Amino acid sequence: MNIFADFHARVAAILDCIAASGRLPEGLDAARFVVEPPKDASLGDLATNAAMVFAKEAKAHFANPRQLATEIAAALAQAEGVEQAEVAGPGFINIRLKKEVFADVLRAVLASCEDYGRAPKGREGSLSGKVNVEYVSANPTGPMHVGHGRGAVFGDALANLLEFAGCEVTREYYINDAGAQVDALARSAYLRYREALGETIAIPDGLYPGDYLKAAGQAIARSYGPALLDKPESEWLAPVRRAAVGAMMAMIRDDLAALRITHEVFFSERTLHEKQNGVSDIDAAIERLRAKGLVYEGRLPPPKGQLPEDWEDRQQTLFKSTAFGDDIDRPLQKSDGSHTYLAADIAYHQTKIDRGFTALIDIWGADHGGYVKRMQAAVAALSDRKVDLDVKLCQMVRLMRGGEPVKMSKRSGDFVTLREVVDEVGVDAVRFMMLYRKNDAPLEFDLAKVIEQSKDNPVFYVQYAHARAKSALRRALAAFPDFDVSAAALAGAPLELLADEGEIALAKSIAQYPRLIEAAAAAHEPHRVAFYLYDLASVFHAHWNRGKDRPQLRFVNAGERDLTRARVALVVSLTCVLASGLGVLGVSAPDEMR
RNA sequence: GGCCCCGUAGCUCAGCUGGAUAGAGCAACUGCCUUCUAAGCAGUAGGCCGCAGGUUCGAAUCCUGCCGGGGUCGCCA
């Protein structure tokens, strides 16, 4: 039950009615107006700007927006559940709902509990269809660091959110297992392999010196023995690379699992380069673009600003990305004839289109921002503008401890890994804090503050609200052992007894959840869920605190059986929404936190 | 220099795709509580929304130009 959506439909119907009487044009686009909470809760429960939005169309029969608003308000005032509808300001309509409406909302919550707010199946519109969310996609050359973690958590929460909002979501990881960097990884692993067989080694610049490759070297030694020692690189490179990438991916999957993240698809870049009947997926994708007249041989002007040392003007194969909004056409081949990263990425996104996704979302680090336009151009070109690619850029994470920056020494490959952070502060803190910030804003992550059990720590504040609500439930059972506190049974509680303003405020906040989910999903902004949960927790804590001075407001009142049942129904509704929202974020909802 | 992101209270940040008197948390100030409902509570103060134009009934939000910060700039991924 989404009261905002309900009233949006009612207002639309009223507008249709007026249109039928000839005083408004037919077929007005209902998507143009909104039904939202009023700016100030004292104004009412719902507000709509419909009269102002259609002021122009109404001009012939209504002198100003207020006149149209007056007519709409008059109709709304007759509607079921409406206490009052009045016109305010330039033409807002504020609606005050009867208390029963909120009782209905709570009954709806109790009926579905953690599925409250979940999109109905098979709905139409932008929040439906097959969506591909590609995230993490860290190079398989070492453990993940904290920055990777942010993209990982963001992508995962966004995928959850879209799923909850009605999309069919595939979570995907693109393994960059094809380029010079994995060759360097293989060479590093080869040295570790020799080391494992007793040699003393030195790791030259340009290779990966981290200890984490020792295990990979030992594993290779176990499978191959000394067999690779005398071989030329051309013979050992491929098997060592396969083993090293495999080991790195196993480590990365472990790190991700520690963050409660799993992908349905791991897509290997290397497979795009492999030829079948002499043609690779990359060749095929380029040919498809060429067939559309979007690939040509030409020269690029040198980049403005400082010229790279080794700049040479040469003819090359270019993708005409400027035809789709890019600033300059982009090369598809390197000087050695191999394909650029973009070429592979084009082929990769072609596979996503071929697999039937109607919306693509990529999560990247902010340092790849310059790459967005060409990729969107590529997807537009490949899909004839039918498939939308949204690229979400995640800004940097600055690790702090008690207000002081944590040194991130990259010397000898020794840096703070994501795993170390997760092990230190826990998954919940990492996930929540990384989502308690817009993705494109830099994030300060303080290892000391996120485990603080105080009001100042949002993770604790929200989880504690859930634990506190559960505690109220336990108290209720202690006072009334015969209570059936299943959600289904509580839906039959005398909810009309809920009359205190704190209780109503809580019900109102709960009523916002479905709308919040839709908006957050449509905007691809999971952080809104985190902020909503914080607000909801705060309404609950405030009401709870009032019970300290005024015991009659407490959820459990031994002498008031019916009232307690109603309040238990409210508190259970709250746990449903808190658990649901935390679930979307991938954060646990603990029953107690002692 | 081109492109992208950011600029909102002293600090850290929201602001629901153009709505009403711009919000929260720290910090500051003022009270209250010394509990057993669980890690304090209630309140006050604090703002040319970087600057200047433009679009319209209406702009923190959209457009243009500046200023400041960050990122990026054929072969890395």
Image: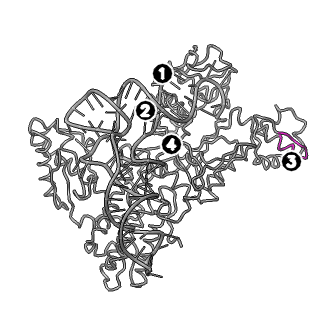
Which residue bears the numbered disc 1?
Answer: A322
Q: Which mark is residue A196?
A: 3
Instruction: Please report whichever mark, 3 or 2, sits nearer to the chain's N-terminal start.
Output: 3
What numbered label is drawn on residue A132?
4
Q: Residue A553 appears in which quarter of the rendering?
A: bottom left
Q: Earlier in the sequence, mark 2 or mark 4?
A: 4
The alpha-carbon separation of the residues under discs 3 and 2 comes to 53 Å
Which span is picked out in magenta?
Answer: A191-202
3 and 1 marks in contact (CB < 8 Å): no
What residue is shown with label 2? A386
Query: What is the quadrant of the N terminus of chain A in the image?
Result: bottom left
Disc number lying in front (3 or 2): 3
Is any atom of residue A173 visible in this view? yes
Residue type, numbered disc 4: Asn
CB-based contact (under 8 Å), mark 1 and mark 2: no
SS at mark 1 in the image: helix
Q: Earlier in the sequence, mark 1 or mark 4?
A: 4
